[in-house]
Amino acid sequence: MSSVAFPTRPPRDYGGAVVTGVREFEGEQDEYVLSVAARLVAGEESALEEIYDRWSALVHTCALRALHDPHDAEDVTQQVFVAAWRSRHTLTPSPSALPSWLIGIARHKISDVRAARSRDVDRARAVAAVPDSDLTVEAADREIADRLVVRQAVQDLPDPRRTIVFLAFWEERSHAEIAETTGLPLGTVKSHVRRGLIHIHQQLEGVRR
């Protein structure tokens, strides 16, 4: 399965003005919005990147206000744009439909997180009587499995993406340092880091589910 190519963002690094609601978009007669929506439906990855740059702050703000957790809000934001790409054929391009469609997807993802939280509470109650030794073994098994999945996911990446991801997360190099080391443009390095993270995240989620 090929990874979905859209840019990721580190926590609290969404940039641009945060829009607090969909209403400001609903009356917008913007030919650019119509064009980028049509390009998304047609399967242009560059359109997804533009849409992410323009509306990720809105989606993240909605998720943060609903969930009150930066990590969950970040995950929801990523999931919304992955889902947007996969379900792009359901979008009818128009200036107002695109942001409303994204918010609709966000609401579903937020509901999923709330449901998962409820299940976590139920599981916590259920395992209260489980001996500590059993819980320790289970947690260790999960940690080992995650490490193996991450290692394999990184090994599966093509170069130079594999090298860039290694430098960024194992050697903790900055994007600028990686660009200087590899001789690649800074924007190219950032793109490889984003897409490498998406690939690793998808592999982990697939195993955990």
Image (cartoon, rainbow, N blue to C red):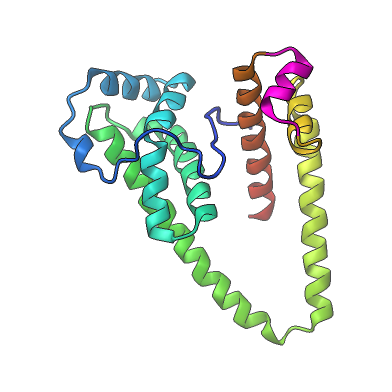
Q: Nearer the viewer, residue 69 or 92?
A: 69
Number of numbered labels in the structure image: 0
Residue at 52% in and 64% down: 116
Describe residue 189's horizontal placement relative to residue 82 as left or right: right
Residue 78: image location, x then y, percent: 51, 42
Q: Which residues are magenta?
A: 173-184
- Residue 2 visible, this orientation: no
In the displayed structure, 1 sits above or below 58; it is above
Residue 16: image location, x then y, percent: 39, 33
Main secondary-structure element of the magenta-colored stretch: helix
Residue at 80% in and 53% down: 145
Q: Nearer the viewer, residue 81 or 177?
A: 177
Describe residue 175's horizontal placement relative to residue 9 as left or right: right
Residue at 79% in and 58% down: 143
Q: Residue furthest left?
A: 27
Q: Which quarter of the rendering shows the C terminus?
A: bottom right
- Residue 69 visible, this orientation: yes
Quadrant of res 144: bottom right
